[in-house]
Image: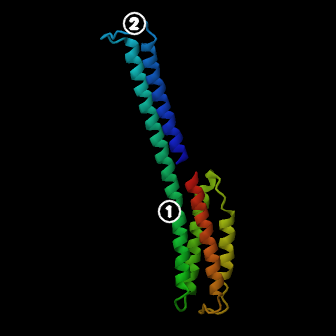
């Protein structure tokens, strides 16, 4: 919101300066009588002001739209990661969920990698996100029996999932503040 306010203030300032310039040019004349003759410099000044204002408004709108699209793309990736985490937690409630949990963790890994590659040019740190994922992975896949999830420390999985979700939301907040 700060960038938008600065840009709108700049556009307003350009328009105000142009209007004041036109008015002050007229006030500096010694004669206070109004002439119905339009001077070519006035027309040129108005046209230049209008064209500059239109160009600046177009450019600002374009940049804001591009930035918003990038933010929404990143945020949608993060929401996909969060939904996958919730699916992992839900799958522990089912019997013989080992294969499903492994598939969901693999999907989560793919989503995190895709997100990491998406934000690499923007220099958003994903180190904490990866670290939390690997901690969750270690706890969530600690199977001692082939078809039994009872050996998994579910509260620890929930805790680490919450930590991962908190990190995701921190990144969302960071993306939105840019």
**Compared to 154, does 125 lie above or below?**
above
**Compared to 114, does 36 lie above or below?**
above
Assess disc 2: are there few (<14), some (14-19) or many (≥20) residues with their C-alpha within 10 Å of its C-alpha.
few
- Which residue is label 1 attached to? 76
From the viewer's side, name the closer residue of 177 and 79.
Answer: 177
Task: Indicate left or right for 73 with 145 as reference.
Answer: left
Q: Nearer the viewer, mark 2 or mark 1?
A: 2
The image position of residue 38, as x and y in percent, is: 33, 12
Task: Indicate left or right for 170 with 80 as reference.
Answer: right
- Indicate the secondary structure of the residue bearing disc 1: helix
Comes first in the chain, label 2 or label 1: 2
Task: Indicate left or right for 48 with 106 as reference.
Answer: left
Residue sitting at 55 percent across and 64 percent down? Answer: 78
Residue sitting at 65 percent across and 72 percent down? Answer: 133
From the viewer's side, name the closer residue of 165 and 22.
Answer: 22
- Which residue is label 2 attached to? 31
Q: Disc 2 versus disc 1: distance between alpha carbons?
A: 64 Å
Residue sitting at 43 percent across and 22 percent down? Answer: 48
From the viewer's side, name the closer residue of 115 and 86.
Answer: 86
Task: Indicate the quadrant where residue 109 lies.
Answer: bottom right
Task: Indicate the quadrant where residue 19 lies.
Answer: top left
The image position of residue 114, as x and y in percent, is: 57, 62
**Compared to 41, does 87 lie above or below?**
below
From the viewer's side, name the closer residue of 113 and 80.
Answer: 80
- Indicate the secondary structure of the residue bearing disc 2: loop
């Amino acid at each position: 919101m700060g960038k938008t306010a600065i840009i709108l203030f700049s556009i307003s300032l350009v328009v105000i300066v142009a209007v004041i310039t036109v008015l002050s040019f007229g006030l500096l004349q010694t004669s206070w009588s109004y002439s119905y003759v339009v001077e070519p410099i006035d027309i040129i000044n108005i046209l230049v002001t209008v064209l500059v204002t239109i160009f600046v408004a177009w450019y600002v709108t374009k940049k804001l739209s591009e930035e918003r699209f990038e933010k929404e793309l990143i945020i949608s990736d993060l929401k996909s990661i969060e939904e996958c985490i919730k699916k992992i937690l839900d799958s522990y409630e089912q019997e013989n969920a080992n294969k499903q949990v492994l598939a969901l963790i693999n999907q989560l890994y793919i989503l995190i990698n895709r997100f990491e590659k998406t934000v690499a040019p923007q220099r958003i740190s994903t180190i904490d996100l990866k670290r939390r994922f690997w901690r969750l992975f270690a706890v969530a896949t600690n199977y001692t029996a082939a078809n039994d999830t009872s050996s998994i420390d579910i509260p620890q999985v929930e805790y680490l999932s919450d930590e991962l979700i908190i990190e995701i939301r921190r990144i969302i907040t960071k993306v939105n503040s840019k």
